[in-house]
Image (spheres, grey):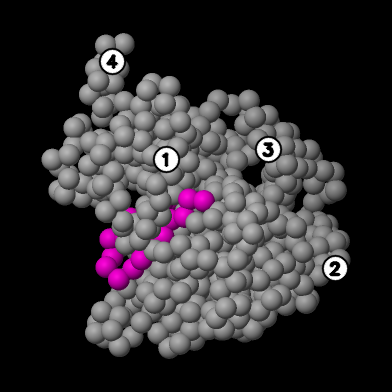
Amino acid sequence: MTRVLSYLNAVGEALRQEMQHDPSVVVFGEDNIGGTGCDGKLGNAWGPTQGLHEHFPDRVFDTPITESAFVGAAVGAAATGLRPVADLLFVDFAGVCFDQILNQAAKLRYMTAGKARVPLVLRAMYGTGMRRGAQHSQALYPLFAHIPGLKVVLPATPADAKGLMAAAIRDDDPVIFFEHKMLYFSHGDVPEEPYVVPLGQARVTRTGGDCTIVALGRMVAEAEKAADELVADGVQCEVIDPRTISPLDTGTIYDSVRRTGHLVVADESNPRCGVAGDIAALVAEHVFDALRGPVRVVTSPHAPVPFAPVLEDAYAPGADQIKAAVRTTIPVLARQEHAS
Amino acid sequence: MPDHPRPDRAELIDIYRTMRTIREFEERLHAEFPGGEIPGAVHLYAGQEAVAAGVCTVLTDEDYVASTHRGHGHAIAKGCDVTAMMLEIYGKAGGLCDGKGGSMHIADFDRGMLGANGVAAGGVPLSCGSALSAKVRGTDQVSVAFVGDGGANQGAFAESLVLASVWQLPVVFVVEDNGYAQATGTRFHLGGRDIAPRAEALGIPAVVVDGYDVLAVREAAAEAVLRARSSEGPTLLDCKAHRFFGHMEGWDQQAYRADGEVDRLVAERDCLRLFADTAIVRQTLTTAELADVDAAVRVLIDHAVDESKSAKDPDIGELLTDVYVTY
Ligand SMILES: Cc1ncc(C[n+]2csc(CCOP(=O)(O)OP(=O)(O)O)c2C)c(N)n1
Ligand SMILES: [Mg+2]
């Protein structure tokens, strides 16, 4: 049975079903219960763990503000028989515990020649739009995708949020699970029963033969909007949501570019050393012969995220920039654009 | 205390004005927030005014403070312009940081205010740095690091204590134990009752202070600041004062607080009322004088809010300034 669910509740449902399914799954983070024991009162958890402790009182914990310790503890617990889902709240706070992610979680399996596995999920909110300023709004997934040993997941829809979370929990490697804070209250059809969306399988959300748009996270909906509007110009775009950026489903991207000859990548993160540039480079290296126009990347600028609403709104890219990029990569349209 | 004798009339009035300004500023933000014009995350300091006011009254303009996400009180007590602060919180042109920082990043280096901070304990190591800077430059400037009870659980805080102790830095760590980190009570996240022993274990003098009593805070701060200025190293003040409002505006229904807890707090532990009722103040200041301060502060805050509501948005060109290169 399918019904409409928010992205936030879809993540929460996956947590609940996976905890049901597997007693080794534990969940912790700051206020994941919310107000442990204060006069016996609970309840200021916000987000997907709300109410979870009522079902699993022994497997949901609040933590002190000790990211180094509790993320590291998640690594150690994962290596010794549990499947922890630890909550960083904002991905920006990875700054205070990066060693545990980069040197411990990511390396253990390799360094021990596979004797240790780290089935850990690290949840993290990312992205602009909530007026949270420079230290609470970054889209830092490229940092993690850069590190061998980590998997990086970016669900764009409620259905994917649920299926990818289930897959992340069942996966035997450390997965950084990025939840866009502006998608939390977006709604979509979500099957009730447990299911898995495999890591490393892209989703083609629109088919079209004129231009491939690869879009990440919140940019997927923007790309779909751009694609819908470009139909009026007679341009049929194919929109690809990779869903996970490590592993990356390069096959689906290459096949599409071979058919369309054009590529635009839409990525909310900063432009240098990022995923958009990486996908552009991979395509240039592997399907250069198919390209019939320049690859365009649409990203945020190389600047921290500003606070003021007008500045933040100008910061993140959207459908308009994606449309403009598509127009300038297709020669006929670029010429029209130039002439007008 | 040679440096800081008992407060005179002028200082008592100043202390009161600082606390009243913070209270009015925060209550006004609380009242305005539901209107929807204030963007983002706003963490109010009401209830804790005596800590900022009691510490900053013994600092000079040249001394430094590094603040937290709950930073309005520290900024006001360090002398930041309240209209420019309000503009910043509204995300408008003319804000202390041109609208690029917001409530969680208010800073004014001309006033020694090194910034509120979005990361728990993020500012504490910065205070070790400004203390080192003063030491190397040969000035007698003192640095103060404010941190919450929750933030004090960070590695950055523990490491800063070690560094300050080993380097004998002129820094004062001011823990503001307001009973909660978001919704989690200290009883459940602190692993002990106080933070003070953590500093003592490193040879740093530490005292637990009644954070509702501004004169007690002032006395403890005066001693700590004198120690720092006389090259005798760091001190930690573990100040206890609970907040009146929720963790963050628009988010927190305070469901985790005990029945009647906040009402009792406001009725019995209001630092402004307690201050006005102390004998020393009663003998020195009149009710009319305090009322004059209240009236003047109200005008000031009204003005700050009016300006902020009608101010222009920042220029869009600001997006790409202050970053060394863009692509
Ligand atoms: C490293 C880090 N982890 C988590 C957060 C999210 N967060 C913001 S404020 C807060 C609670 C802080 O509690 P405390 O230090 O006691 O300050 P208070 O809010 O009580 O003034 C948390 C967990 C953060 N800002 N930084
Ligand atoms: Mg606190």
* Left or right for B185, reference B295: left
Q: Which residues are magenta?
A: A137-157
As measured in the structure, the alpha-carbon distance from the residue carrying label 4 to the one carrying label 3 is 43 Å
Pick whichever of labels 1 and 4 is earlier in the sequence.
1
- Whether residues under marks 2 and 3 lie with C-beta atoms below 8 angstroms apart, the answer is no
* Left or right for A313, reference A142: right
Quadrant location, the C terminus of chain A: top left
Residue that label 3 marks: B36
* Circle 4 or circle 2, nearest the eye: 4
As measured in the structure, the alpha-carbon distance from the residue carrying label 2 to the one carrying label 3 is 29 Å
Residue that label 2 marks: B259
The amino acid pointed to by label 4 is: Gln
Helix or strand or loop: what does disc 2 sit on? loop
On residue B153, which mark appears? none
Based on the displayed image, in which of its 4 quarters is residue A117 positioned? bottom left
The amino acid pointed to by label 2 is: Asp
* Circle 1 or circle 4, nearest the eye: 1
Residue that label 1 marks: A206
Residue visible at 22% across and 24% down? Answer: A331
Helix or strand or loop: what does disc 4 sit on? helix
The amino acid pointed to by label 1 is: Arg
